[in-house]
Amino acid sequence: MKIEVVELRRIRLPLVTPFRTSFGTETERDILLVRVGGAGSDGWGECVAMSEPLYSSEYVEGAHAVTRDHLLPRLRSLGPSLTPEEVGPALSAVKGHPMAKAAVEMAVLDGELSERGESLATYLGAVRPSVPSGVSVGIMPSISQLLDAVGAYLDQGYVRVKLKIEPGWDLEPVRAVRERFGDELALQVDANTAYSLGDAPALARLDPFGLLLIEQPLPEDDVAGHAALARLIRTPICLDESITSASAAADAINRGAASIINVKAGRVGGYLEAKRVHDVCAGLGVPVWCGGMLETGLGRAANVALAALPNFTLPGDTSASDRYWHRDLTTPFILKDGHLEVPTGPGLGVGPDPARLAEVTVSVEEIPWKD
Ligand code: NPQ
Ligand code: MG
């Protein structure tokens, strides 16, 4: 596509309910959006960085600064016309900042594919018209509130439940959910790095509950620890934070640290690398599922397209818009029989509703593009 203007926009969206994980509680999202304007169409990218560096080292102010000061100048040096495939290589000299890079690449993907009239799903290699929806359930003040929340999500049709856990909120919530909703419920847990290898005996107490997986029990950089833990517990280990690229995925799998992989485009630097994670895992016979970072309809659309690839054989954290938002930025994603439809329109297949966008915008920065 030929870029004529780039805009960095910050929006504020309140969550329908506070979301507590082992690393903190979120009540609203402060989101960086990237718009690349071309002759014919706009492309939108959504940066999944949180306001504080608690999930990973990135955070929204840092992502905004690195995008403006280090990523966009390199993108501009590619010349007036560029393809999505050129974005990653052009930004690779900048170390780290995968969420910022992913947002820039997503905007160019949406812009280019919109011009070509091709959907992101088709471009990535989607094989399904809809994807099964799981829901991620935060740490609650009490077991009874947790059971009410899980019951309400099951009534809405979610096909898989993930409980956020931490030391002191693990065995009892899992036991209570199993007792109330039965052994047939597809149930998994996510620790967001809250444990150490010394907690192996406590984590082994989850073994009898038939969990699909335990996600990221140990710190991001502790692949060896996860391999050791995998020999001490029966629940399959799935890695999220540790998987920063396709080669990191292959390494973790080959070292016995993970038998399932969570794929998030923001964590690995973009949807093209996310597809490579999918491909590498498929080659090694390891199933993957699509993670979530409390995205608006823009990021949600891209995640749903990604989740339609063949090796996404487990339901993802691809929840409906109303799991997080009173009103989404785009046409909302709605649960139909526990599934979300994969958009078929050009690019993301959805765009921001102008009135809603204006309502939630906090700042807009236009980046000079032409010389
Ligand atoms: C995970 N996501 O799988 C993340 C964690 C997470 C859906 O569980 C603001 C932005 C708040 C990103 C809270 C889910 C967040 C966030 C949790 C990501 O580990
Ligand atoms: Mg996770």
Image (cartoon, rainbow, N blue to C red):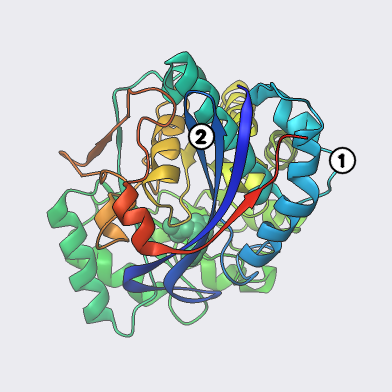
Say what amino acid the circle numbered 2 marks.
Answer: Gly
Left or right, 245 with respect to 294, comes to right
Rounded to the nearest whole Å, what is the CA distance between mark 2 and mark 1?
24 Å
Can you name the residue that lies furthest to the bottom here? 141
Q: Position of residue 114 (x, y in %)?
A: 45, 23
Disc 2: residue Cβ within 8 A of ligand 1's nearest atom: no
Which quadrant of the figure has residue 55?
bottom right
Pointers 2 and 1 in contact (C-beta within 8 Å): no
Q: Nearer the viewer, residue 266 or 145?
A: 266
Q: Position of residue 177 (x, y in %)?
A: 26, 66
- At horizontal 63% and vertical 41% (from top left) the residue drawn is 104
Q: Quadrant of the C terminus?
A: top right
Q: Position of residue 27 (x, y in %)?
A: 40, 75
- Secondary structure under tag 1 reads loop
Can you name the residue that lies furthest to the left here? 155
Say what amino acid the circle numbered 1 marks.
Answer: Ala
Left or right, 268 with respect to 215, comes to right
- At horizontal 12% and vertical 56% (from top left) the residue drawn is 155
Mark 2 — residue? 43
Q: Nearer the viewer, residue 37 or 189?
A: 37
Q: Earlier in the sequence, mark 2 or mark 1?
A: 2
Q: Position of residue 19 (x, y in %)?
A: 39, 71
Mark 1 residue crowding within 10 angstroms, few (<14) / some (14–19) / many (20+): few
Q: Nearer the viewer, residue 228 or 40?
A: 40
Does residue 257 appear in the picture of this structure?
A: no
- At horizontal 37% and vertical 58% (from top left) the residue drawn is 358
- Secondary structure under tag 2 reads strand
Mark 1 — residue? 93
Q: Quadrant of the N terminus?
A: top right
Is 62 placed above or below 289 here?
Answer: below
Left or right, 310 with respect to 154, comes to right
